[in-house]
Amino acid sequence: MSARDDILGRIRRATGRAEGAAVPTPAYAATTLVPARGRGTPVELVARFVAMAEEASATVDRVAAPDDVPEAVAAYLAGENLPSVAAMAPSAALGALPWERTALTLRQGAAGVDDLVSITPAAAGIAETGSLMVRSGASSPYTLNFLPDTHVVVLEASDVVGAYEDAWAEMRPDGETGAALPRTVTLITGPSRSSDIERTVTIGVHGPRRLHIVLVGKADGETT
């Protein structure tokens, strides 16, 4: 038995799990680890996600349907007096939206040092902390999340989950092996900030100064 096998065996025994058991389901996690703010109905979780994201200094705009996204993004950028030029993730879902309805100039691909605005999808929104889970890949270049001063994220309301465990369960559909995991998974909570320098909070030190979330659609059971 290797040292790794010994360590993992001890962990399994401590948690009461048999060797080869599947990753714990969200229901199991909810009874053991997840705080109350990570639980609730879909309607409650979406409302909590919005509240927690705004508490972390992100801004949130809700739209009824995907086709409403381009005009919502254009309105946000215009309202903040920001450039109408953006680097956008080469995602098929984003690319299919009616951007031609706007005056935005979009370039698909990774962000460069001169890009001031980026537009990306998110894999999940986490109600527990108002965080976004984003994944790297050909359709979501990693630099889009960090280089531009303004990061606009498009998130489906149906992709809002309660807790981190729920988000990882969605990210790992093949269970504990994690074979489908992307090379990089990042959790984003509000704009970049740091208090490393003289304990003064500074926005935009390690990433975007602004995080704007366009939340698309309704939660299951939501009527308004």
Image (tube, grey):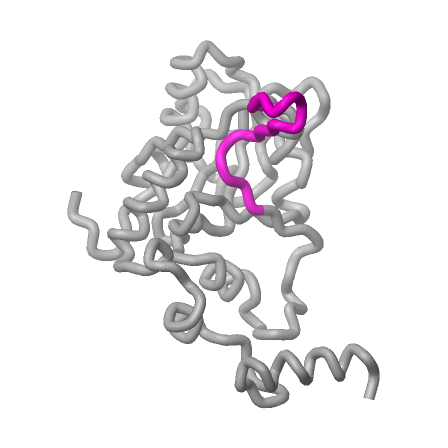
Compared with 103, 33 (above or below) is below
Quadrant location of residue 115?
top right
Magenta region's main secondary structure?
loop
Residue 133 x/y as whole percent: 53, 48
Residue 134 x/y as whole percent: 56, 46
Residue 38 x/y as whole percent: 37, 57
- Which residue extends farthest top? 81
Residue at image point 66% right, 40% down: 141
> Is 199 colored magenta in this rendering?
yes
> Is 167 colored magenta in this rendering?
no
Q: Nearer the viewer, residue 171 or 32?
A: 32
Residue at image point 71% right, 54% down: 183
Residue at image point 26% right, 52% down: 44
Q: Nearer the viewer, residue 223 or 45?
A: 45
- Which residue extends farthest front? 198
Apparent side of residue 73 relative to residue 64 in the rendered image (left or right): right
Residue 56 x/y as whole percent: 44, 34
Quadrant in the picture for the N terminus: bottom right
Quadrant in the picture for the C terminus: top left
Span shown in magenta: 187-204
- Which residue extends farthest left? 223
Quadrant location of residue 155?
top left
Apparent side of residue 151 relative to residue 147 in the rendered image (left or right): left
